[in-house]
Amino acid sequence: MVMTAVLEFADVTVRRGQATLLDRINWTVEEDERWVILGPNGAGKTTLLQVAAAHIHPTSGVAGILEEVLGTVDVFDLRPRIGLTSAALAERIPRHELVHDVVVSASYGVVGRWREAYDALDHERAADLLVEVGARHLTDRTFGTLSEGERKRVQIARALMTDPELLLLDEPAAGLDLGGREDLVSTLSVLAMDPDSPATVLVSHHVEEIPPGFTHALLLRGGRVVASGLLDHVITESNLSAAFGMPLVLSHADGRWAARRRTRHSAG
Ligand SMILES: Nc1ncnc2c1ncn2[C@@H]1O[C@H](COP(=O)(O)OP(=O)(O)OP(=O)(O)O)[C@@H](O)[C@H]1O
Ligand SMILES: [Mg+2]
């Protein structure tokens, strides 16, 4: 199988006034990879995802997205090929819209490979995706009546609706309780392990949220890459301590990670 890069960033830099939000990011994502981006508040994670989503352009450097170069291609051709979930997008979903419609409407105005047979197929696909994210029982509810965790699931189904080649999830576990987080991690793990799933990039603050099946990690701090590569090589005590700016103790069991501050009582 020939692998093609879904993202190919070379020295991607984003500046706003005097501030450097991203500083010479070099990053390649292949189509069978599932990446987690970790870093503290203000590290530049959302900014990086916004470049990957073709929502903002680098100030300098080259952002290759789905074999196109950002700045030389119509972003309105590129964006339908990318599924994105974020708090900002969730705010724009009308509260009174039915869950099924929230998902199916992602395809309106989109010209894609399964486009021709339109209606019936669209509705079938939306229903299947709601099953896939464990939200079948919510189909006939309005979006505004859903809990935070239920909304996250519906948003993921919506992001998958256009059959994207790249799936970008900005903090999908934010605001979830422990059970909600664990359910979401399982859903994302199933997606990650499905070879038919698109290349995926998940932004998080917590190693506890890394779903089994994710393959790579990128650690950001102050707009710079602290470490990047295979998950097991990147998620180490020293890399995480550097990214979060405090000494951390890391544990890894049953395919899941956990981290806490190192104290003089910490073992090891
Ligand atoms: N227009 C702007 N001008 C100046 N600074 C900005 C601008 N937009 C964003 N920033 C800053 O860029 C930095 C990176 O922001 P970004 O939203 O990418 O961080 P993040 O890693 O997603 O943080 P969080 O974990 O809190 O979501 C932040 O310090 C933010 O305040
Ligand atoms: Mg953010």
Image (cartoon, grey):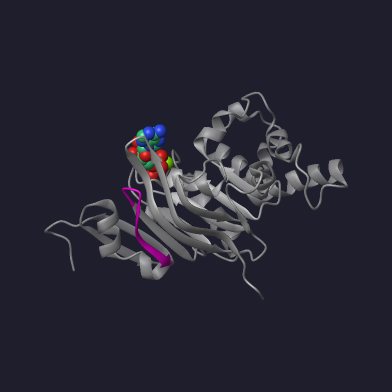
In percent of the image, x 68 and y 43: which residue is there? 136
Image quadrant containing the C terminus: bottom left
Q: Position of residue 124 (x, y in %)?
A: 80, 46
User: Looking at this rendering, what residue extends furthest in the right direction?
Assistant: 117
User: Looking at this rendering, what residue extends furthest in the top direction?
Assistant: 96
> Does 87 sit left or right of 81 as displayed?
left
> Does 256 sit left or right of 86 as displayed?
left
Q: Quadrant of residue 118?
A: top right
Q: Position of residue 79 (x, y in %)?
A: 64, 44
Image quadrant containing the N terminus: bottom right
User: Looking at this rendering, what residue extends furthest in the left direction?
Assistant: 264
The answer to whether one can see residue 147 in this image is no
> Does 65 sit left or right of 220 as displayed?
right
Nearest the eye: 197 or 254: 197
In percent of the image, x 31 and y 66: which residue is there? 236
The main secondary structure of the magenta stretch is strand
Q: Quadrant of residue 243?
A: bottom left
How many numbered badges does the structure rendering display? 0
The answer to whether one can see residue 114 in this image is yes
Assign ligand 1 to one image quadrant. Answer: top left
Nearest the eye: 53 or 125: 53
Q: Position of residue 93 (x, y in %)?
A: 61, 29
Nearest the eye: 104 or 44: 44
Q: Position of residue 127 (x, y in %)?
A: 74, 44
Nearest the eye: 10 or 191: 10
Report the span colored magenta: 221-230
In percent of the image, x 11 and y 58: which residue is there? 264
224 within the magenta span: yes
165 within the magenta span: no
